[in-house]
Amino acid sequence: MDPVAKYDLLREHLSKLESVLVAYSGGVDSTLLAFTANAVLGDSCLSVLAVSDTYPESECEYARGIANQLGIPLIEVETHELVDPQFRANAPDRCYHCKTELFGLLRTVADHRGLKHVADGSNVDDLGDHRPGSRAARELGVVSPLQQAGMTKDDIRDIARMLTLPNWDKPSMACLASRFPYGQAITEAGLQSVASAEESLRQLGLRQFRVRAHGDVARVEVDPQEMDSAWDMRELVASAVREAGFIFVAQDLHGYRSGSLNEALDDAQDLGRSPESGA
């Protein structure tokens, strides 16, 4: 099915929902969903931005700007993942605890506003990765209209470009907690160090990358198309990351890939052990 047909299917799915609260982050997925839901449902649609220590303030500011530019009705809520010891412990099901809090809060807001459904921006590509948060979504009845319409990430970007959404080519952004290997505790200081390092690299001109925190070591994953550029300015990269609080800085030769820390889960399963065992 071509992207235009999938977009028609998305609009059909949304119209059947009658009213919806959209979990919005400012990324291209949730922006397409929020923009379309607002166009289809009008006043029966509301988007909600979750403000948290696990997302940089710069991302929240960006999300607010996009919503304002597109006329998307938006409210904000605060989430407090770090008060949950199960989240801080950073086991492989960390996202489950985070999303349980988030979607539970959004469900409460939706009920208060008289909105029937809570929707997130998950797409078909998300089905192939380790995503414990999807279990929380199912348990709390969250719907995923982009996924239901059969949309991949490429479909979403194609449609967003056709609709001239300003963030159609925005690099993917994930929760800052995803920068820490499972079993390494999530702390406010650690999140701030990663956020500071990534903001500095963004200021240097890099677009798609991650700073993975391994204790005192920052492992920088850069999109293969940008790896030569990152290497050419390695002194600036190293200096910026060290200023954020790391002692050692390494560039990953495999480059950026989404969910790279889940590779440890695959390796542990192959060897018949739990990823926390450290063996």
Image (cartoon, grey):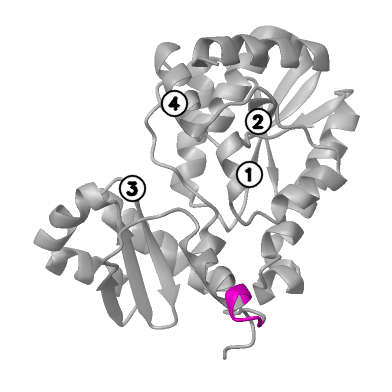
- State the separation of the CA atoms marked 3 and 2: 24 Å
Which residue in the structure is indicated by mark 4? 157
User: Secondary structure beneath disc 3?
Assistant: loop
- State the separation of the CA atoms marked 2 and 4: 14 Å
- State the separation of the CA atoms marked 2 and 1: 9 Å
- The answer to which image quadrant residue 62 occupies is top left
Q: Which label was assigned to residue 266?
A: none
Which residue in the structure is indicated by mark 1? 127
Q: Earlier in the sequence, mark 3 or mark 1?
A: 1
At label 4, the amino acid type is Arg
At label 2, the amino acid type is Gln
Q: Earlier in the sequence, mark 3 or mark 2?
A: 2
- At 64% from the left and 20% from the top, the residue drawn is 73
- At 72% from the left and 10% from the top, the residue drawn is 12
Question: Vertical placement of 274 versus 239: above or below?
Answer: below
Q: Magenta region's main secondary structure?
A: loop
Which residue in the structure is indicated by mark 3? 208
Which residue in the structure is indicated by mark 2? 147
User: Secondary structure beneath disc 4?
Assistant: helix
Q: Earlier in the sequence, mark 2 or mark 4?
A: 2
Residue stretch in magenta = 269-273
Position of 66 with respect to 279 (left or right) is: left
Tell me whether circle 2 and circle 1 mark residues in contact (CB < 8 Å): yes
- State the separation of the CA atoms marked 1 and 4: 18 Å
